[in-house]
Image (tube, helix red, strand yellow):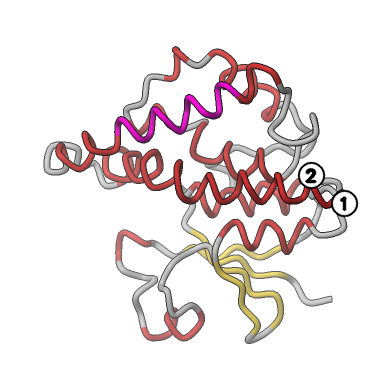
Amino acid sequence: METLRLYDFLPSGNGYKIRLLLTQIGMPFERIEVNITKGETRTPEFLSKNPNGKIPLLEIEPGKYLAESNAILVYLSEGTEFLPYDRFLRAQVLQWLFFEQYSHEPFIATSRFLISILGKSEENQEAIKQRREPGYAALKVMENQLTFHTFFVGERYTIADIALFAYTHVAHEGGFDMTQFPAIQAWIERVKSQPGYISIQQE
C-alpha cells in the first residue's frame, strides 16, 4: 500500500484534524510542511495538486489528491469506529461537519489566524470584532449539545468530535473566553483522553 502524504501547515486546525485521525487509526503517513504565511500554497506546483490552493491536501497515491479537511476525514474514517455505520448517525456526523465549516471555522479559526498566527490583531480589529458574535453563537450551539451528550453523535467519539475539537480547543488563541462553556471544557478533556491523542503542535 502507498504511504499517504499529507500536505500540512503545523499550526492549522484543519491539518491537525487529519493528523489526529491518522494517528488514532494507526495509519502511517508522511507529513510535508507547506507554510501558508509564505504563499507556499499559491505556487504553480502546489496549485497543480489543489487548484483551490489550500491545505490540508492528502495524496492517496501518486497523482491522486483529496482536499477539504472534512472530506478527508470522511474518506479516512470509512469502515472504522470513527464513522458510524447507521445511516441516521452518519448523517448526523455530516451535519456537524457542515456546521463546523459553515458556522464555526470561519469565525473561530479566522480570529485565531489573525491574532495568534499572523500576530496582526491591531490591523484587523474590525474583522476580529465582526467574528465575535457568530463565533460565540457557534460555541453556544456546541455547549447546548454537550450539556446533554458526552460526544456529538451517538454518545461516542467520532470524526464530528475531531472536526469540532481542532479549532475549539484553541479558541482562546482567537480571543474567545472559554470559561463560560463548562460542557465544552469537559468535552475537550474527554477528547484529550482518547487513545492515540496528539496535540496540535505534534508532527
Q: Residues within 10 Å of mark 1 (few under 14, many from 20)?
A: few
| Along the line of sight, the residue nearer the viewer: 56 or 201 | 56
**Residue 194: image location, x then y, percent:** 76, 31
Q: Which mark is residue 89?
A: 2
* Residue at 31% from the left image edge and 59% from the top image edge: 37
From the image, which quarter does the N terminus lie in?
bottom right
Question: Does dot 2 land on a helix, a strand or a loop?
Answer: helix
Our reading of the magenta stretch's main secondary structure is helix
Q: Quadrant of residue 202?
A: top right
Classify 29 as above or below 14: below
Where is 173 relative to 182, above or below? below
What residue is drawn where x is 52% and y is 31%? 169
Residue pointed to by mark 1: 85
Residue 137 drawn in magenta = yes
Mark 1 element type: loop
Q: Is residue 76 magenta?
A: no
On screen, residue 67 versus residue 123, left or right, reads right
- The answer to whether 182 is drawn above or below residue 164 in the figure is above
Left or right placement of residue 136 versus residue 193 in this view: left
Q: Which residue is drawn at the image coordinates 54% and 54% (left, top)?
A: 15
Q: Position of residue 9 (x, y in %)?
A: 47, 57
Task: Report x, y in % for residue 163.
Answer: 60, 45
Outermost residue, left direction?
123
Q: Position of residue 95 (x, y in %)?
A: 63, 47
Q: Real-space Cα distance between discs 1 and 2?
A: 7 Å
Which three-letter amino acid code belongs to the residue tagged 2?
Leu
Image height of 155 relative to 76, above or below:
above
Judge left or right: residue 49 versus residue 126: right
Q: Are marks 1 and 2 in contact (CB under 8 Å)?
A: yes
**Magenta region, residue range:** 132-144
82 vs 170, nearest the viewer: 82
